[in-house]
Amino acid sequence: MGTVGGAAYGEATGERRSLSEAEFTAYVQERRASLYATAYHLTGDRFEAEDLLQSALFSTYRAWDRISDKAAVGGYLRRTMTNLHISAWRRRKLNEYPTEELPETPGDTDAMRGTELRAVLWQALARLPELQRTMLVLRYYEGRTDPEIAEILDISVGTVKSSIWRSLRRLREDEVLSFGRDEENAFGELVA
């Protein structure tokens, strides 16, 4: 009789697991493009974005049965991606040091010719420190407020405000973004 009861329990658990797995798979298939976009905006690199999204999905899958409000899964996943990204660059930060010169050298031709403005902006964002880039992504791509960003990054609201201001100033002064134009027109065209 213990076997029968155990089998029944095992079948019920297996059915519940199959249903949860199907729900999770449907959720990911429906929202994979926006989730990947968030991961890409955080990392600035296609391969790192794929790894980040995969890690966040794995973590979310493990917690799927504990998430009672399935409407909040998007926020849970984005928060997980942000936390994983922050942890990764904190670990990596010890091995990377800023230098006076970037390893890439700009070509002799017009930097804007044949290049989408969006791609140029992402290149400029990639030159920002990761914390500043993360703040800009959270603010302008995720629509987060300063207090939300401060809570996510575990820093003060004042630090968020000043860092975002400095980041935007650096983007306005970026030579590649303003090549051949005055700064205000070049930057305005990119963020419009």
Image: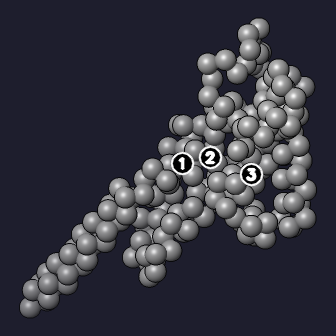
In the drawing, what numbered circle is on residue 41?
Answer: 2
- Give the left or right position of residue 89, taking residue 132 as reference: left
In the drawing, what numbered circle is on residue 136?
Answer: 3
Please state which amino acid type lies under the numbered disc 3. Leu
Gap between marks 1 and 2, in whole Å? 6 Å
In the drawing, what numbered circle is on residue 162?
Answer: none
In the drawing, what numbered circle is on residue 37?
Answer: 1
- Quarter holding the N terminus is bottom left
Which is more toward the observer, 177 or 86? 177
Gap between marks 3 and 1, in whole Å? 14 Å
Measured as percent of width and height from the top left, residue 76 is found at 54, 68
**Pointer 1 and pointer 2: residues touching (CB < 8 Å)?**
yes
For label 2, the crowd category at 10 Å Cα-Cα, with few meaning under 14, some 14 to 19 and many 20 or more, is many
Please state which amino acid type lies under the numbered disc 2. His
- Asked if 46 appears above or below 10 in the picture, the reply is above
Which is more toward the observer, 18 or 40? 40
At mark 1, the secondary structure is: helix
Q: Quadrant for residue 10, please give it.
A: bottom left
Measured as percent of width and height from the top left, residue 178 is found at 82, 28
Measured as percent of width and height from the top left, residue 180 is found at 82, 20
Please state which amino acid type lies under the numbered disc 1. Ala
Could you tell me which residue is drawn at 57 percent across and 52 percent down? 38
- Let me know if residue 53 appears in the view: yes
- Quarter holding the C terminus is top right
Could you tell me which residue is drawn at 83 percent across and 64 percent down? 155
Extreme residue in the bottom direction: 1
Which is more toward the observer, 101 or 172? 172
